Image (tube, grey):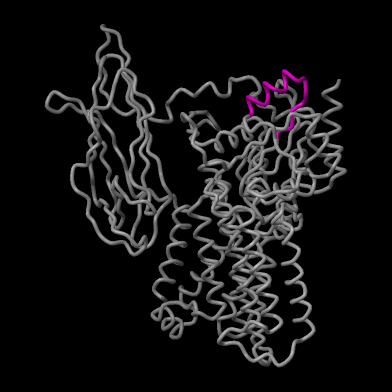
Amino acid sequence: MKKFLFLLIAGIFAHTVAFAQIMEPVKWKASIQEKNNEKEILFRATIEDGWHLYATDIPSGGPIATSFTFDELVNASLNGDIKPAKRPHEEYSSLFDMKLGWYTSQIEFRQPIKIEKSNNFKITGYITYQACNDVTCLPPTKFEFSFEENKSAATPAPVMTPVSFNKKTPTSLTDQEGWQPVVEEIRAMSTDPISQSNSLWVIFISGFVGGLLALLTPCVWPMIPLTVSFFLKKQQSRRKAISEAVLYGLSIIVIYVGVGLIITLLFGASALNDLATNALFNILFFALLVLFAVSFFGAFDITLPASWSNKLDRKADTATGIIAIFFMAFTLVLVSFSCTGPIIGTLLVEAASWGGTLAPAVGMGGFAIALAIPFALFAMFPSLMKQLPKSGGWLNTVKVVLGFLELALSLKFLSVADLAYGWHILDRETFLVLWIVIFAMLGFYLLGKLNFSHDSPVKHISVPRLFLAIVSLSFSLYMVPGLWGAPLKSISAFAPPLYTQDFNLYDQEVHAIFHDYNRGLAYARKTNKPVLIDFSGYGCVNCRKMEATVWTDPIVKKMLEEKFVLITLIVDDKEKLKKPIVVEENGKSIKLTTVGEKWSFLQRYKFGANAQPYYVIINDKGEPLAPPYGYSESVPQFIRFLHKGLKEFNK
């Protein structure tokens, strides 16, 4: 069990480090060759030591198999299936609990082709693959390839080599009506101090305020019991506890400033949102929280390997202790991305638009400091709690209560992956049933009706324990009407949206007419109505809160349904586009392969924003009519926002 826990934790840590260091253990080369008077594409993969590349026939439920996708075949066709040059090494993988095949060092794949016109053909596509080592797997990666020949008879034949993806001619997506950027118009309308002031102090304060707001988001809550439980196990002096708590806070700041800037600057403003809605990422943290919950219930203790423990005994200041604290900080940063990603994205986009690298660093510093201070205090708290008299089993009761809470909160991460990929394994009623049972069991535990093997006998119920039991049981009963469609506004940020529920008697929801920008714009021209664009996301908890608390207001509902053409664009929708789209952004060519990537690019390209929820009112030409509206549960303020857009449209 200890070995399994260590591998799981090490795997998650290595997974996060891979993002920070941008590992590329597999290098691809592609070329067209002639063999026995037949042409073929040769794909050669060079694999670093310690890593392996999976074969093309991986069983369902395993890692990502190596696959070859051909997008365009002009005057060319495939002549049979692609074949590897050698058989893969086959071995049982304890990580995936199945027999898998993989390649190490180097492997070649050959795809026979027929070229109808040797002086005029085009072949494009991409390879999807996943690299793994003994403890971790990197996210699925793509390698694009392109071959084309277009010459006259008098022109010498050039050497046929893969065309660089970054040299492709951009698609005409951004030339469509309504896609033209309106960033300057939005900035002129906005009263946001970030876009109106040139003071680095303003950016720092804005980042600090964003960090304080992030503390109120539900994605940060699971890390409070994780932090407490981690430092609770450490036997040390008060001075040592304070120094490690400070190190924990500094680690949070360094990671947020460093990793956040690296990912965003290298991969674009939507990278944090992409990571937050990644299925592997969310399932790993779902499993991690369930693992901690089971540990808190007393099934086992999560401890470091014995070799690490011995080193800690011999030398208290060994590097292992620092790494462990740094890993906890990494966990906090990544878990909180589900909610803080949009805040960080907006901050970086606005700050980076000033044209310097100092402004984003200052903004991220303010954000990280606001988030790190309270967690450093949480880290100090366990050692102070250790010095209190251990009367009865109160300390174990705290751990069990935290276990119930972590079990409930783990479902949020599974729900994000479920929504983004459309699995439908955790629809709203299933989610609510699990929460009702969990919080009912928590109430019975606090009343002493449910005991674990390591619990102390409960002779009487204290007043605080009684009140906590009342709160837990009342909360459980509060959620019961949700099974029939009650909106349950207080948990709308956690629960899946109402439309995922099969049996729903509630009829006050507001649903968008369109989920496609171009179609919605065309409908607005026919009906002569203004457009309200709702940039949303499956993993956006604040979007669910706005839909449940603001949109259901009778006045707002009537205006949205009668006065506007409502278009909801989901920026983390993983549905594949029929055909990949290549666009230019910040001087680079990027490839959009999913519906969510397309709408995320629209938000960045046209409006210069990356936060969700993000509401903007435009006319049928795509011109803004009012300053954009972000997350605010003030119904009167949202109504004023709608009225202002209508007033400008009627002019």
Residue under the image location 49 percent in, 29 percent down? 581
Query: Relative to 33, is 413 on the left or the right?
Result: right
In x, y percent, where is residue 25? 34, 50
Q: Residue at x 37, y 38 (%)?
A: 143
Taking the magenta stretch, the answer to whether it contains residue 527 is: yes
Going by the picture, which residue comes out furthest to the left? 36
The span shown in magenta is: 517-533
Image quadrant holding the N terminus, namely bottom left
Q: Is residue 306 magenta?
A: no
Q: Nearer the viewer, residue 499 or 68?
A: 499
Q: How many marks?
A: 0
Q: Is residue 108 above or below residue 373?
A: above
| Magenta region, main secondary structure | helix
Q: Residue at coordinates 46% horizontally, 29% vertically from top-left?
A: 579
In front of the other: 556 or 89: 556
- Expressed as whole percent of the image width and height from the top left, the position of residue 279 reads 50, 51
Res. 114 in view: yes
- Is the residue 402 above or below the residue 38 in the image? below
Q: Quadrant of the C terminus?
A: top right
Q: Is residue 294 above or below residue 85?
A: below
Q: Is residue 212 visible?
A: no
Q: Position of residue 481 (x, y in %)?
A: 74, 58
Give the image location of residue 566, x and y in percent.
Answer: 72, 32
- Tell which of 478 and 618 is nearer to you: 478
- Locate residue 225 relative to residue 307 in the image: left or right: right
